[in-house]
Amino acid sequence: MKWILFLWSLLHTTASISQDAEIMPYIDAWKVADTTQSYRSQVFFDSLRIHKDEPAYRTKYLGHIAQLQRYIKAHPDRRLQVRLLMFEIMAAREYNYENRYYPVIDEAIKRAYPLQDEQLNAELYSIRADIPPSLETHILYNLKALEIQRRVGFQYFPYTQNRFFGVSSALYSQGDYQRALNYGKQCIDIWNIDTLHRDVRVFIFQCDIMGAAYNKLHKYDSARWYYNRILLALNQEPVPYMKHLWEGIARGNIGQTLTAEGHYAAALPLLNEYLQNSRAGSDSLNITMAQNALARWHLLQKQYPAALSAARHALQIARPHNWYAEIIDAAGLIRDFYKQTGNMDSAFYYEEVRNRFQEQEREKNKKSAFSVIKAQIAFDNLQHSLVLAQSVAGREKSIRNALLTGIVLLTIIALLLYNRKRAKEQYRLREMELQNAAARRDVQEVREKITSFTRNIIEKNDLIQLLQQQLNSKDTATATSEQLRSYPLLTEDDWEKFRGQFSKAYPAFFGNLRGHMENLTPAMERLAALIFLKLTNYQIANTLGISKDSVARSKRRLRTGLNLDSDQLLEAKITTLDLHA
């Protein structure tokens, strides 16, 4: 029995030693506290990433994690605990179950604080910047990591260029183009420090942000320089699909800078290539951006149908995705099209669409700004609790809280100023609406007067006709009838008043009439106005104080001037002369 127990103990000890041997490389690397510690630990992260799609390696690493947990439980060590938590988080990210480990990173930061190891903290902040994904924490923790890395030395950290890229990208998305450029330049400046972990796509994405930021700042030569760097870097891109897509993106953005500078002939083939490559890659966002770029080009060339078609296509794609920048751009282009083609109702509609999405974008940025403050507060609260745990003086808390109060006050002031500006804009729009409503009321009132005038003329003509019928039985009928027919219902002063009221009611009428007929006389204007009011020849004759035959002759002259064949065509033509009012 004793021999059996001895053999069992020996086997267990041998197995334990064998298992410990498997995890000793981790332990040896993770216990290091000097400046080489980051690269020593990165070896295991790299192995996870390289073999993440191989089931055998997944089983192996998950087994190592279990063994390390047992080892650390038997041999407590704060540094090893933190390093193991970091390795678990990275494994979870590679194996797509990181949701289970989101809270662990904050726990790792808390556990690491008593070690007072800035380099370790910088590594933790780099992980926290991406887990869980959030624009606000991404900026904050990347900046915290870079602050430490700058002090320790960038050469001691892997992927430092990605930290700069992350900050540059986030700042660009918030519209802070100058700061995005500053961090982007630092990303490119240190590109050759960590040659082992460089990714050509990060370089391409960074150059794209630089070019886009310079484009927003109207520095087109600088924008083109970075897009040309993308074209050079694409020689290292191994995937044909990505290479083809980004060739189109780079050349398309160069085309946009040329369009802005008025080099239209050089810009067009680049913009067309952008659209074709984006379609070939089924990249909806870049298809939208290419369509907007082409719409702008066509609009500047006064090729209005093509401009409208491209902008509408961009808006159709962008709206379901809520791509605010592209929706605002497309709506603005469609608005400009309708302005330039004289359709003001449609122009006002698309201006309203554009303003609505601009407001939504401002609200999103405002929420993002508050989220940054909240993230900063949360980070500082974490630091404060750790400082209290280490019995550090409370002076830092007062200074930090004062800074945060200043940030909040500045934010409140900015919001108040913004709301004041918005209120002024709403007041201005309201005044415009009231003015338009008043103008519409004036036109309606004048048209009612014209209708009343027409009705009075018809009544007077009916009265004259009745008098003529009564006088026909008398001897003086002929003379009286001619006298009545020659009596004008409107004096010259009345005609001037009538013409003024008629022009208010139908402002385009006389202008359109003159546009269709040269050598237009005042008599022809009067005749055309009465035809427009649908008066008969008899009523026109009585109104103008002329005979019916004279009316017929006047109509023939008017028809001839307008190149029309019949009275029906004349009347139809006259009724269309106010359509563009």
Image (cartoon, grey):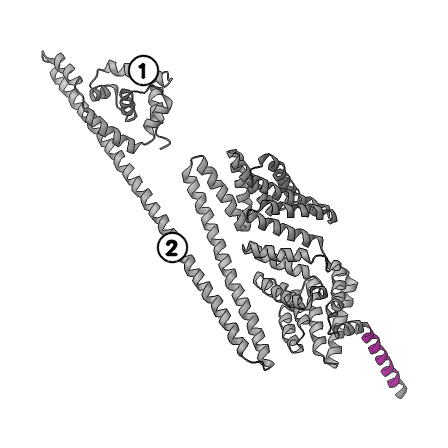
What type of secondary structure mainly makes up the magenta span?
helix
Could you tell me which residue is drawn at 29 percent across and 33 percent down?
A: 505
Q: Is residue 110 left or right of residue 460?
A: right
Tell us which disc is closer to us: 1 or 2: 2
On the question of residue 282 being in view, the answer is no
Q: Residues within 10 Å of mark 2 (few under 14, many from 20)?
A: few
Query: Sequence order check: which comes first, mark 1 or mark 2?
Result: 2
**For the residue marked with disc 2, what is the amino acid?**
Ala
Q: Position of residue 418 (x, y in %)?
A: 43, 57
Quadrant of the image occupied by residue 297 = top right
The residue lying furthest to the bottom in this view is 2
* Residue that numbered label 2 is attached to: 423
Looking at the rendering, the stretch of residues picked out in magenta corresponds to 4-21
**Element carrying mark 2:** helix
Q: Is residue 11 left or right of residue 105?
A: right
Residue 437, above or below 536: below
Residue 26, above or below 553: below
Q: How many marks?
A: 2
* Residue that numbered label 1 is attached to: 557
Q: Magenta stretch containing residue 463, yes or no?
A: no
On the question of residue 495 being in view, the answer is yes
State which quarter of the image contains the N terminus.
bottom right
Residue 443, above or below 32: above
**For the residue marked with disc 1, what is the amino acid?**
Arg
Q: Position of residue 21 (x, y in %)?
A: 83, 74
Residue 155, above or below 203: below
Spatial CA span between label 1 and label 2: 58 Å
